[in-house]
Image: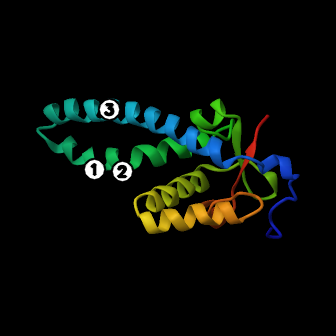
């Protein structure tokens, strides 16, 4: 581990990869609902702004997941709704709470990897090969997913 990371007991990160997958599936559902709500709002605003608000559609599509993760992981509970349901939370370097920007960058790196099959495979392989089960985007941002229970 790097010098900035606390020495975590093995049980803190043991078995986190499978719950992360299921937490992500829950979060995709939450993000989809949020995205539909935002699309409806932008569509209605577009009618009142003579179509100008419709330029926000790409921003809503690209930004909803990143903003959701930034708000939830960067919040006081340090986890997304899916992570909470599966008993996970995110800690920063030295076991600290994650700030909004770091949480957003973490999510952005994940979505870039998820959109590129080769990078996603590398991201997952890093997690499978590391003892602490940190994926590549976790390592790059200095974050660790731990068991909250």
Q: Secondary structure at mark 3?
A: helix
Q: Is residue 97 left or right of residue 33?
A: right
Q: Is residue 146 left or right of residue 125?
A: right
Q: Which of marks 2 and 3 precedes in the sequence?
A: 3
Q: Which mark is residue 62?
A: 2
Could you tell me if residue 13 is visible in this image?
yes
Could you tell me if residue 56 is visible in this image?
no
Q: Observer-nearest residue: 54 or 36?
A: 36
The image's colouring method is rainbow
Q: Which mark is residue 139?
A: none
**Position of residue 60 measured from the top left corner of the image (x, y, whole percent):** 33, 44
Neighbour tally class for label 2: few under 14, some 14-19, many 20 plus, Cα within 10 Å: few
Picture quadrant where residue 94 is located: bottom right
> Which residue is labeled 1 in the image?
58
Q: CA distance from mark 3 to mark 2?
A: 13 Å
Q: Which of marks 3 and 1 precedes in the sequence?
A: 3
Q: Is residue 15 left or right of residue 58?
A: right
Q: Is residue 120 above or below residue 17?
A: below
> Which residue is labeled 3 in the image?
36
Image quarter hosting the N terminus: bottom right
Q: Secondary structure at mark 2?
A: helix
Q: Are marks 1 and 2 in contact (CB under 8 Å)?
A: yes
Q: Observer-nearest residue: 80 or 101?
A: 80
Q: Is residue 64 above or below residue 116?
A: above
**Position of residue 38 measured from the top left corner of the image (x, y, whole percent):** 33, 34
């Amino acid at each position: 581990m790097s010098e900035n990371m606390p020495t975590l007991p093995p049980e803190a990160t043991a078995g986190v990869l499978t719950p992360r997958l299921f937490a992500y599936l829950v979060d995709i559902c939450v993000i989809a609902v949020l995205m539909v709500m935002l699309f409806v709002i932008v569509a209605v605003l577009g009618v009142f702004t003579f179509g100008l608000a419709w330029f926000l559609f790409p921003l809503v599509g690209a930004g909803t997941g990143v903003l959701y993760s930034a708000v939830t992981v960067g919040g006081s509970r340090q986890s997304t709704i899916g992570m909470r349901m599966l008993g996970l939370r995110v800690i920063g370097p030295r076991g600290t709470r994650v700030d909004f920007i770091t949480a957003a960058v973490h999510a952005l790196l994940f979505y870039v990897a998820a959109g590129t099959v080769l990078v996603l495979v590398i991201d997952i392989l890093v997690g499978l090969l590391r003892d602490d089960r940190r994926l590549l985007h976790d390592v790059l941002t200095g974050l660790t997913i731990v068991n909250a229970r």
